[in-house]
Image (cartoon, rainbow, N blue to C red):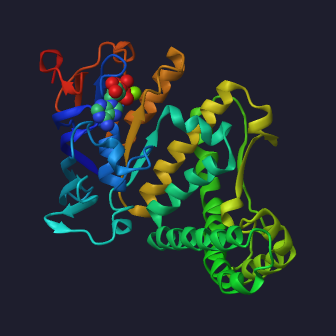
Amino acid sequence: MKISNAHLRSFRNHNETVFDFGARVNVLLGENGQGKTNALEALSFLCLTKSFYASADATVMQQQQSFFEIKSVLQSDEGKEFHVRVTYDDVKKEKKFTINGAAVEKFSSVIGMFPVVILSPENSSITFGSPADRRKFIDLVISQSSKSYVEDSMEYRRIVRQRNTILSEAKGRDCSSDIAPWNDMLIRYGSKIINKRNQFLKEFAPYIAQTYLDIVDERETPKIEYAPSIYIQSESTVENISSAMEQKLQKKKNDEMRFQTTLVGPHRDDILFSLNGMSLKHFASQGQHKTFLVALKVAEFFFLKERCNETPIFLLDDVFSELDEYRSKKLLTLAESLGQIFITTTSEKIFGGAEWNNERRKFFIRSGAIDNEMVVA
Ligand SMILES: Nc1ncnc2c1ncn2[C@@H]1O[C@H](COP(=O)(O)OP(=O)(O)O)[C@@H](O)[C@H]1O
Ligand SMILES: [Mg+2]
């Protein structure tokens, strides 16, 4: 997959910015707060139909405006062209997504069409943060490789919300008969999600082992394990998982009414990372955290490339500022070998002596615009 160009209108601080991208490496240079990350966010919007960090569409719309638009031409590995256009109208609260002029009815159908991997400072929460951060990470990988997962997850979230409403409206009183029909739904969708995550983590393990080996000189063995909220085994089937969920729901029935919230299901899962058998969260150094994260993201790249049958685009947001020169150069060499990449950075130093041409372009971003004077292409 490649992004040939992108036209941003009223997107964050980009009033009207037109990018003509290089086929391999694209460097967005500039001081802090100029609109580099915003440009990557617009690219992620094309691939995921939403922002990779803002939850509401209106947030990315330029202040004082009532719409935004992103237009772009993307090209598949086979050379097929996709003219993609996203618009948001704040008056009608309406988002539209068109591919080659045809309106997309279900946004979930786009996810995975244009695979993308993002490495940004916020991602440090994947190894440092809460189980929710880790679920978000695996959910985005699985979603891009499985359409049914996106739909099942949306349905599951709706069920949990409904169930929580019943539990909280009961204010601790017995509401078993009201939640009974929701239990079946919770089990039906929850078990599918748990099963998919279980399968995914088994399939993903060799990818992380390989990339870690490629990145790290030392002999460290990374491990990624599923820690679901119910007891399952590596070979568990959807049926096994359903009955385990049913039993646990029965056991937690009173607690759920007391705490007025759903306590059983994949929304309570965690994923454990370890190095040489030691929990990353509890024992790893800052450097090991960073390396693990890079390995996860590169593993995600190769996993998606294989599953989607399409080379993902790779967005690297401000990743060099936290790494020393040796690690930065190593990461850059690795990233450049993957596919089309987009890098934001405040300093050009790491690219010292690089040649800029049709394959490798740099854009100097200032106040939400490309400063052409500074562009060498
Ligand atoms: N919705 C918005 N409308 C207008 N400006 C915005 C909006 N959201 C963020 N900004 C501005 O974008 C700038 C930050 O851009 P960003 O891409 O994060 O910078 P950087 O170049 O450091 O990555 C800030 O000046 C901020 O005020
Ligand atoms: Mg930034």
Q: Quadrant of residue 203?
A: bottom right
Please report the residue visible at 53 percent of the width from the left and 22 percent of the height from the top. 327
Q: Residue at x 74, y 73 (%)?
A: 235
Q: Is residue 230 left or right of residue 292?
A: right
Q: Quadrant of ligand 1?
A: top left
Query: Which image quadrant is residue 177 in?
Result: bottom right
In the image, residue 181 sits, relative to residue 140, either above or below, namely below
Instruction: Work out whether 206 lies above or below 237.
Output: above
**Residue 375 in the image: x percent, y percent?**
17, 20
Task: Find residue 260 and report its horizontal and vertical position in percent.
Answer: 74, 65
Residue 374: x and y, percent? 17, 15
- Side of 372 where 333 appears, left or right: right
Is 158 on the left or on the right of 179, as rendered? left
Nearer to the camera, 259 or 181? 259
* Residue 298 in the figure: left or right of residue 180: left
Q: How many numbered discs?
A: 0
> Which quarter of the rendering shows the C terminus?
top left
Residue 33: x %, y % from top left: 35, 22
> Is residue 370 among the parts visible in the rendering?
yes
**Residue placed most toward the observer, 357 or 293:** 293
* Residue at 61% over, 32% down: 291
Q: Is residue 214 visible?
A: no
Which sits in the foreground, 180 or 112? 180
Residue 28 occupies quadrant? top left
Residue 328 vertical placement versus 159 (above, below): above
